Amino acid sequence: MSDAVIVGVDGSVFSLDAVDLAAREAHLRGAPLRIVHAFGHRPAHLPSDAAPWSPFDHGLEPMVQGVLARAEERAHAAAPGVEITRSVVAGEALEVLEIESRSAVLAVVGSRGLSAFAGLLLGSTAVHLAAHGHCPLMVARGRPAPAGPVLLAVDGSPAGEAAVEFAFSEAALRKAPLLALHVWNTFSERAYEGPGDPLNAVVADADHLREAEQQLLDETVAFRQEDFAQVLVERRLVRSRIRPALIDASHEAQLVVAGARGRGGFTGLLLGSVSQALLHHAGCPVAVVRGRE
């Protein structure tokens, strides 16, 4: 199914939360919803020369169909009228959902799954898709039924341009205001979060730096605001540590949008520290948008 919202399910409460979110996102977009369940592990007792592995050949169909039925029921409750299909795909969830994302308009997953270790804040599927997926990723997390603006983490990087466009589109879809937040400090590395206080680091001209950061914020927003005149935008420049400031702001937002990488990432790094921090700790759903390659 092309241009669908896809959601990965595994029967966990986290994946059912993702189904709720995905159904609402599909409704907003007027798109169909595709519920995907990946069956990845071939039972150890099967001989190596056995027929291709399928859960339906080994007595697992009732369990699989139960998982899918519960997910579809949740989707119908969250967004009545959305067209829904469901699919069981043989393969590891990471690989299956990455492939599925190639023809999707949005991928949605839970913050954790059944395989997560106790106490783990974020599942491997979410991290993998944020770094390698072929469409924007939305991760269900934070407080239930969040309200407030769409929060855009502005970093001014070329890789972040796709996130800016996505955030404006999401605000327009939701008829919500957009809060464009740019966090700066006087330390030379914008993503610095180590010991000490980078806010007090010595710079040649803090006032000049503040003006430059304000210009970066203004230019980033103005570039897209012409195309989304209906979106009410608040531009907010904050001098603080980057990750804590964005996490704090997410508790007043309905969605936070960030690029997969910012200006502070190392060359070759597929997922930056800011987007990872939001995926782990944000108070609302998080959308991570990869730049065009």
Image: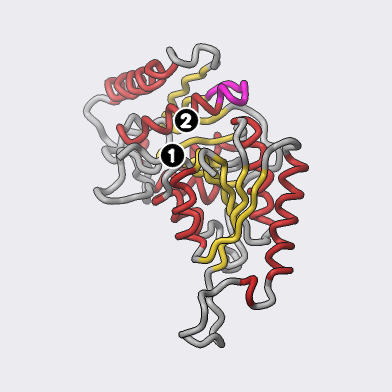
Residue under the image location 53 percent in, 66 percent down: 90
User: Which residue is at the front of the view, 125 or 55?
Assistant: 55
What residue range appears in magenta? 171-178
Identified by mark 1, the residue type is Val
Residue 179 position within the rendered picture, expressed as x and y whole percent measured from the top left: 52, 25
Q: Amino acid at mark 2?
A: Phe
Task: Tell me if residue 39 comes above or below residue 8 in the rendering.
Answer: below
Q: Are marks 1 and 2 in contact (CB under 8 Å)?
A: yes
Q: Looking at the image, is mark 1 or mark 2 earlier in the sequence?
A: 2
Q: Residue at x 56, y 87 (%)?
A: 45
Q: Residue at x 25, y 24 (%)?
A: 205
Q: Nearer the viewer, residue 3 or 113?
A: 3
Give the numbered dot on residue 289.
1
What coloring was used for the rendering? secondary structure
**Is residue 279 something one can see in this rendering?**
yes
Pointer 2 residue: 166
Q: Is residue 175 magenta?
A: yes
Instruction: Evaluate whether residue 241 shows in this view.
Output: no
Does residue 18 belong to the magenta stretch?
no
Label 2 neighbour load within 10 Å: few <14, some 14-19, many 20+: many
Above/below status of 48 relative to 89: below
Q: Quadrant of residue 170?
A: top right
Instruction: Where is residue 284? Give x, y as percent.
Output: 60, 40
